[in-house]
Image: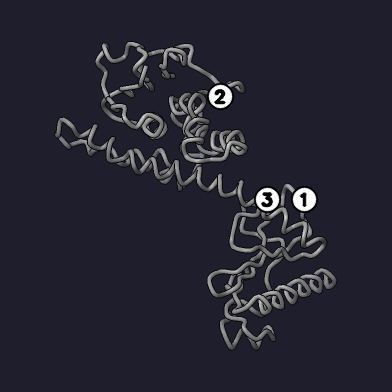
């Protein structure tokens, strides 16, 4: 039977059922998204999916709640919210609907679950305190989505529903952008791995365009690589490689003598015709041609070698 209704609770909303609604409304675009606590709508039926309400987790009956006891748990014992339950059941189909290639679906499903869904589950269940984000706690996705709720003295009888449906496209943009970035990283990996193979023992990785390269470097165990070059518009860039995604520290910095210089001053300091810019923090430089940026990269590598010898 065709799904005609997607049913969740009325009243105030949380990130988990809002994000669940993003997934379900893409998969069932003709279904009505109904927010209610009317018991007649919370009875499982073939034409509806019930989530974050209903007091049961029975995928075969298309009901996905997590508030009952015992509550549904992941294999590792961590709790699900309704978002985790919906993602577990419908996530792969959702990725296919977004155009993710079949060979990438399982890896992206797992990555999105770990990086995006699980934190929502933990916060919703009180299994992780918002304070772990420190001063950024008010900028977590659940907090930002929660800020879209109506203010306390909004007396409109439709205030909660109006806010929910206004927040839905915003929540959708976060999910879709996150998945599109995961898919882009998967596409980039084969390109970067080929570039690493071409570079051989060189500490300079040349790419055909700016793209995610970190996971490919780790996969190839290319620890010898220090800098990345690629075209950007009409220019070329030279970038340092961060030690990890959790730090700004790099495997190697660009030469200190270049820091903050532009144009003629940078050409004089580097000795490279076409050098245009070096960031004061020494993580990126720009030149007008491939030849110029490769010359700058070679100088940067030699500067690193000299600093190692001096130490």
Count all numbered tags in the image, as a single digit.
Answer: 3
Q: Residues within 10 Å of mark 1 (few under 14, many from 20)?
A: few
Considering only order in the chain, which callout, 1 or 2, is on the residue closer to the N terminus?
2
SS at circle 3? helix
Calculate the distance from the C-alpha at mark 2 to the C-alpha at mark 1.
32 Å
Q: Image check: 30 left or right of 180?
A: left
Are the residues tagged 1 and 3 within 8 Å (C-beta)? Answer: no
Q: Look at the image and tell me in which quarter the N terminus lies.
A: top left
Tell which of 295 and 3 is nearer to you. Answer: 3
Instruction: Find residue 243 and name its label.
Output: none
Calculate the distance from the C-alpha at mark 1 to the C-alpha at mark 3.
14 Å
254 shown above or below 201: below
Q: Residue at x 42, y 46 (%)?
A: 139
Question: Where is residue 171 drawn, in percent x and y?
Answer: 38, 40
Q: Image check: 139 left or right of 104?
A: left
Q: Look at the image and tell me in which quarter the C terminus lies.
A: bottom right
Question: Where is residue 308 drawn, in percent x and y?
Answer: 82, 68
Front disc: 2 or 1: 1
33 shown above or below 132: above
Front disc: 2 or 3: 3
Tell which of 121 and 38 is nearer to you. Answer: 38
Tell which of 298 and 193 is nearer to you. Answer: 193
Are the residues tagged 2 and 3 within 8 Å (C-beta)? Answer: no
Calculate the distance from the C-alpha at mark 2 to the C-alpha at mark 3.
34 Å
Question: Where is residue 78 drawn, in percent x and y?
Answer: 56, 24
Q: Which residue is mark 3?
A: 190
Q: Residues within 10 Å of mark 2 (few under 14, many from 20)?
A: few
Q: Which residue is mark 1?
A: 221
Q: Residue at x 56, y 45 (%)?
A: 183
Tell which of 304 and 56 is nearer to you. Answer: 56
Q: Which residue is mark 2?
A: 78
């Amino acid at each position: 039977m065709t799904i005609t209704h997607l049913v969740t609770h009325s009243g105030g909303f949380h990130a988990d059922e809002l994000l669940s609604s993003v997934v379900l409304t893409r998969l069932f675009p003709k279904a009505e998204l109904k927010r209610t606590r009317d018991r007649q709508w919370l009875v499982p039926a073939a034409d509806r999916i019930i989530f974050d309400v209903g007091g049961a987790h029975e995928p075969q009956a298309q009901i996905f709640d997590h508030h009952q006891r015992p509550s549904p748990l992941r294999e590792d014992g961590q709790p699900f919210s309704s978002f985790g339950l919906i993602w577990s059941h419908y996530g792969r189909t959702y990725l296919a609907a977004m155009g993710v290639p079949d060979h990438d679906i399982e890896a992206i499903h797992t990555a999105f679950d770990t990086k995006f869904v699980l934190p929502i589950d933990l916060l919703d269940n009180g299994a992780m305190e918002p304070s772990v984000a420190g001063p950024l706690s008010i900028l977590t996705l659940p907090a930002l989505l929660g800020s879209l709720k109506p203010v306390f003295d909004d007396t409109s009888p439709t205030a909660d529903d109006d806010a929910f449906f206004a927040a839905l496209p915003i929540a959708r943009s976060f999910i879709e952008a996150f998945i599109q970035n995961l898919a882009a990283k998967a596409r980039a990996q084969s390109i970067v791995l080929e570039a690493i193979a071409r570079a051989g023992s060189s500490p300079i990785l040349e790419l055909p365009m700016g793209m995610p390269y970190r996971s490919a470097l780790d996969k190839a165990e290319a620890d010898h690589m220090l800098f990345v070059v690629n075209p950007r518009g009409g220019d070329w860039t030279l970038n340092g490689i961060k030690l990890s995604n959790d730090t700004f520290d790099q495997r190697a910095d660009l030469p200190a003598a270049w820091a903050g210089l532009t144009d003629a001053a940078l050409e004089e300091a580097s000795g490279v015709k076409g050098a245009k810019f070096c960031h004061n923090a020494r993580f990126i430089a720009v030149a007008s041609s491939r030849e110029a940026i490769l010359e700058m990269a070679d100088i940067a590598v030699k500067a690193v070698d000299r600093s190692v010898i001096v130490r």
